Amino acid sequence: MTGQAGPVALRGGGHPWAAAVLCTALLMALLTALPVLPPTTTASASAAEAKPAVSLSEQQAGKGGDITVKGSGWRPRALLMMLICGRSTTDRGVIGGTNSCANAEGRAVTTDARGAFRKKLPVSEPPVPCPCVVHVATVTGEPATADAAFVVAGHPIAALPKEGAGGRLAVLATPRLEGESGVLTWFGAPPARRLALTVGNLGSTPVKDPVFEVGTAHGVFAPQWEERQWRGTIPSGRKARIELPVELTAGAHGDYQVSLRYGGKVLAEQPWGVGRPWGVTLFWVLLCLVVPAAVFRIGMAIVDKVRPRAARPAKRTRKPPAKRTPKPGRERGPGRGPQHGPEHGAAPDRPTGPGGGSGPAGSPATTTAALPWFTPDSAPSENRPTKGHS
């Protein structure tokens, strides 16, 4: 009975310590698994909400020194540009765009796989007074910027321009360049596009007929600004889509940067790659081939006209042969003609009698015509006997 009481009592709950041990084991397993989940979720949320940030090794330095710039929260493998800019704050940004920065002493850096970087930046004086910032911005891809306050020792300081009490515009979507190039652009016509973007009014008053500035920059040169007015009204707290024309000079090609500025602040920047006008190249190639050929032909014609010509002999005209009168031949025996006929084998005229026959036998002008099948010696004669006659 003792051997059967244990199992029966366990199934019936006779030993409470066994249930306590089982519950304790389950609780410990849950406590061990719970701390693992929240950090993973927190890390994912922080990675998703991470924004580009910049920190400096020193907050103040003089011209000629250098500082170390650290960044985090950027896109992995992104190309960035670091600049020291004047007339700028972290809340208002860079007033005047890159024209307020020391562009010649800027440095480029590429982020690692985690979106972080570390790079030394030489300290230089910007072209405008401070307050100054270290401005970091993406070069390609989706635009992103971050600023860190910095003091350039010995550089003048001036107050920032006051913000207008009216509406404030901000870009709400990435700008785009719309439109296509025509056939004339292939032959050097000015490329043209439309800068389309969505802006919102963050101020307390509506903005009516705002005047924007559109700038185009090629390479390392500063942008050339032109005013473009947009007709319309943007109420407070509303947004609107605007389109502004952008046009380059004739024959422009290469990489350009289109910037939009409003109220002295750069709102957006967009790269623009313009193809080479190959029609102009083809025209110059044909011109280099046709013009030398035409000049050569004109020169040869001039040389042919100017060069002295050799005296040419006078053209001889062939006169018709003079008609010769037959000379009276020497008298020979009766019936014999001259030994040699007249010139060119023509027989001399033989006088004929009144009846068309030959003249008298003893006439001094009597001659015999030389026939081609007779020779003068074999010609028949009156005094020469023939066959069949005695």
Image (spheres, rainbow, N blue to C red):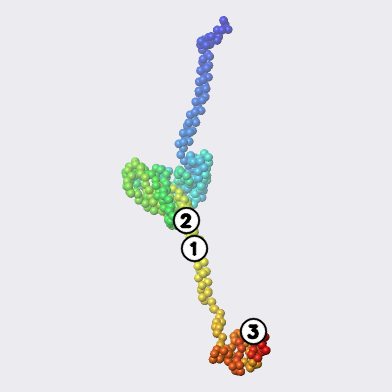
Q: Are marks 1 and 3 in contact (CB under 8 Å)?
A: no
Q: Nearer the viewer, residue 338 or 296?
A: 338
Q: Residue at x 51, y 61 (%)?
A: 285
Give how far across and how far down residue 4 sits, in percent: 56, 7
Q: Nearer the viewer, mark 2 or mark 3?
A: 3
Q: Earlier in the sequence, mark 1 or mark 2?
A: 2
Q: What is the number of the mark on residue 374?
A: 3
Question: Which residue does the numbered mark 2 point to in the structure image?
Answer: 277
Give the secondary structure at mark 3: loop
Tell me which amino acid carries mark 1: Leu
Q: Nearer the viewer, residue 334 or 42?
A: 334
Q: Residue at x 64, y 92 (%)?
A: 334
Quadrant showing the C terminus: bottom right
Q: Earlier in the sequence, mark 2 or mark 3?
A: 2
Give the secondary structure at mark 2: loop
Q: CA distance from mark 2 to mark 3?
A: 96 Å
Q: CA distance from mark 1 to mark 2?
A: 16 Å
Tell me which amino acid carries mark 2: Pro
Question: Which residue does the numbered mark 1 point to in the structure image?
Answer: 287
Q: Earlier in the sequence, mark 1 or mark 3?
A: 1
